[in-house]
Amino acid sequence: MLSGPGGVGKGTVVRLLLERHDGLRLSVSATTRPPRAGELDGRDYHFLSDAEFDELVISGALLEWAEFAGRRYGTPWSSVEQQLEDARTVILEIDVQGALQVRRRFAEAVLVFLAPPSPDALRERLRTRGTDSEERITERLAIAEWEQRQAEAFDHIVTNDDLDRAAEEIGRILSASSAADAGAGR
């Protein structure tokens, strides 16, 4: 699982990992937020209405879910289950609340926290993205402070101060985890 504050570069790191590791599969999350420019339903997220998301929660079809800034995000079991049955390494790009839920359900899950080099660097990344107002950036930074305090609950903390280096480090973590799972007969 890859988690960290919004704007830290999780999506970019995941894209690099998928390009570099053939056996790696990405779980596609569901969300109630509208798509951003260039995002496609089913590829980037499953974009759902509030009622559709409610149904997934009620039916127990989500591995985890959390609310973030007035929108809900979650991981459908269906996006993980078949990959695991086929003995594939599945990466979940999820928020910190969701990662902690998965940890409670699956102690063997490997949690990687992607940290910004500094709060100022995170603020600059959020501004550069151009998707949020200054007020929204301030809200995201307040949430990021809480998320940073949760990092000690993760198995690994990787600082995204250099994109290639961070992706390589996470790739090594995933490879080591996959080798350990194979050795344990999973």
Image: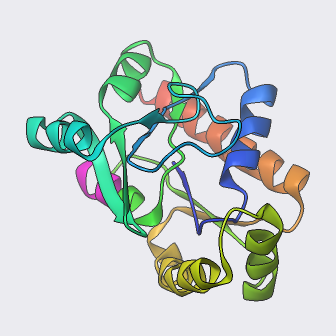
Task: Name the spot of residue 89 as percent of width and height, x first.
Answer: 54, 28
Q: Residue furthest top?
A: 86
Quarter-of-image position of residue 39: top right
Residue pictured at 40% horizontal, 26% vertical = 79
Indicate whether residue 69 is drawn in magenta: no
Q: What color scheme is it?
A: rainbow
Indicate whether residue 103 is drawn in magenta: yes
Asked if residue 38 lies left or right of residue 68, the reply is: right
Q: Is residue 35 visible?
A: yes
Residue pictured at 89% horizontal, 50% vertical = 164
The number of discs equals 0
Bounds of the magenta segment: 101-105
In this rendering, the answer to whether 53 lies above or below 69 is above
Quarter-of-image position of residue 171: top right
In this rendering, the answer to whether 4 lies above or below 79 is below
Q: 36 or 23, which lies in front?
A: 36
Query: Which SS type dominates the magenta stretch?
Result: helix
Asked if residue 72 lies left or right of residue 62, the reply is: right
Task: Name the spot of residue 170 as percent of width and height, x first.
Answer: 71, 49
Task: Name the spot of residue 175 as percent of width and height, x first.
Answer: 67, 35
Residue pictured at 44% horizontal, 71% vertical = 153
In which quadrant of the rendered image does the C terminus lie? Answer: top left
Task: Name the spot of residue 118 as percent of width and height, x first.
Answer: 77, 84
Q: Is residue 186 visible?
A: no
Q: Residue furthest left?
A: 58
In this rendering, the answer to whether 51 lies above or below 77 is below
